[in-house]
Image (cartoon, helix red, strand yellow):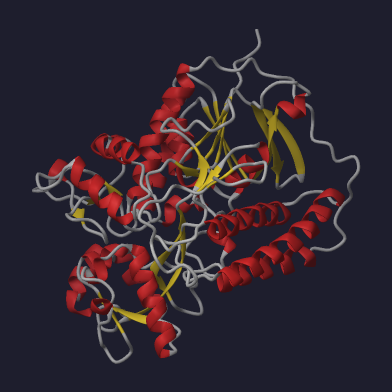
Amino acid sequence: MTPEPSVVIVGAGLAGLTVALHLADRHPVVVLAKRGFDEAATAWAQGGIVGVLGDDDSVELHVRDTQEAGAGLVDEHAAEFIAEHSAAAIGWLVDQGVPFTTDPEGPLGLHLTREGGHAVRRIAHAADATGRAIHQALLERARRHPNITMRERMMAIDLVTSRHVGRDEPTRCYGVYALDIDRGRVETLPAASVVLATGGVGKVYRYTTNPETSTGDGIAMAWRAGCRIANMEFVQFHPTCLYHPEERNFLITEALRGEGAHLELPDGTRFMADHDARLELAPRDIVARAIDFEMKKHGLDHVWLNATHLGEAFLVEHFPTIHARCLELGIDIARQPIPVVPAAHYTCGGVVTDLDGRTDIPGLFAVGETTYTGLHGANRLASNSLLECVVVGRTCAARIDAEAPGAGEELPPWDESRVENADEQVVISHNWDELRLFMWNYVGIVRTTKRLERALRRIRLLEDEIDEYYASFRVNRDLLELRNLVACAELVVRSALTRHESRGLHYSRDYPFTLPATLPTIVIPDGGAD
């Protein structure tokens, strides 16, 4: 009897592990991580996860806050659905052993904090290392489950679709080609279903709070396979990344501002009142642009985040990770302000899916930061991302469970008969550096049409070089990541050029106004955009 084909999940962060754990009692699951399992972006999340739990909160209030942050582009049904399931999501994580910070008087016995854009305290957290606590708990569960096969240092190259198996049919996904990095060998993995959970595109920018894994792999693979991609112009820049020569991507959580930390100029002057009545608790796009404005106005490399008035005992108790890491770098946050700068943080667009994670291609699902569900609109509300991973991860697993599993196709092996080993890697490293620098300079917090057009011309030149390299030499991780980043960079720039207004995370000097009504930017694989 032919064994049931596995569900192959590409990515081992919160989204991928949620799907895996909900499926594994009934189906064999294979989870791929292109680096170590501890290196997912989830583990870098500090702030927390939204839960509509308190007596002063409601689904309607959370939806309102999500809509306001999303600047008119939030899908109301998606926001309502995810808010309605937030309490159950928190409960499931508690059942998985996540050690949230407790408060005997808090709802469910949890301590709730507040972040920018939220009207009330509704963020469940594990001190200031929530993502790491969640990720470690779920990883432990997944590693122990007999039906889950965990494979690290396995990088998906492309999806195996109908064209690979020679079928004259609407495109369907049958599996994945994946590179075993240690062996330098490409494997063909048949799948009952494939789930993309590879995170965002933060590494397309020179400065980012994201880990090395955030190279847009799932978005690029889905795009090449024929999926629609939406809202890629909306890349969130976190307002407060630590500015330090030894630590370029250490996030200073928004929860610190939620507890009362102030943004200041070098002379101690607070400046957020000049930009928004909500001060430091305005949505992230507003705070990031305010910091960018003040830095340019005063010729600064960074601004300061002052939390000294909160007291050492409070900071050590509630923000131990930040306190300890800054001390290691010579910054005592209880006695001196923290130098901070905005950095690329979260991809609000991605592969178009429904709330079951279904993409345009049967057999292919996507969950988490890789996707566009409509929840985040033009700017993600803080701590909604982990919530989306859990809620849609569960519904995605239920949808896969409800569909009859594939029969297990005989898939063609990877063909590298016409390629050879690369004679040098300098082309890859040079193109990587060039891409990230001009994306930072031309497609950052503030944009112009001229800058975007200049970036697009450079992207097209890089694409030609990379395609030639890809066709001639055996693949390696650096080449595959660069190939994916360039594809995602083009999607970001094309989407930005299409939007003739400023909205949320997309601010254009040529179109500084906000239109009275708008629609998501959807790029379709034949080269058009809606």
- Residue 474, given in percent of the width and then of the height, sits at 82, 49
Residue that appears at 59% across and 16% down: 4
Query: Taking the image as drawn, is residue 125 in sight?
Result: no
For this rendering, which residue is in front, 439 or 13?
439
- Residue 138, given in percent of the width and then of the height, sits at 40, 40
Total tally of numbered discs in the picture = 0
Residue that appears at 79% across and 35% down: 414
- In the image, 350: left or right of 504? right
Which of the 4 quarters of the picture holds residue 215?
bottom right
- In the rendered view, tell whether residue 522 sits above or below residue 446: above
Q: From this viewpoint, which residue is outermost toward the top?
A: 1
Q: From this viewpoint, which residue is outermost toward the bottom?
A: 267
- Residue 132, given in percent of the width and then of the height, sits at 39, 52
Which of the 4 quarters of the picture holds residue 53?
top left
- In the image, 234: left or right of 154? left
- In the rendered view, tell whether residue 2 sits above or below residue 467: above
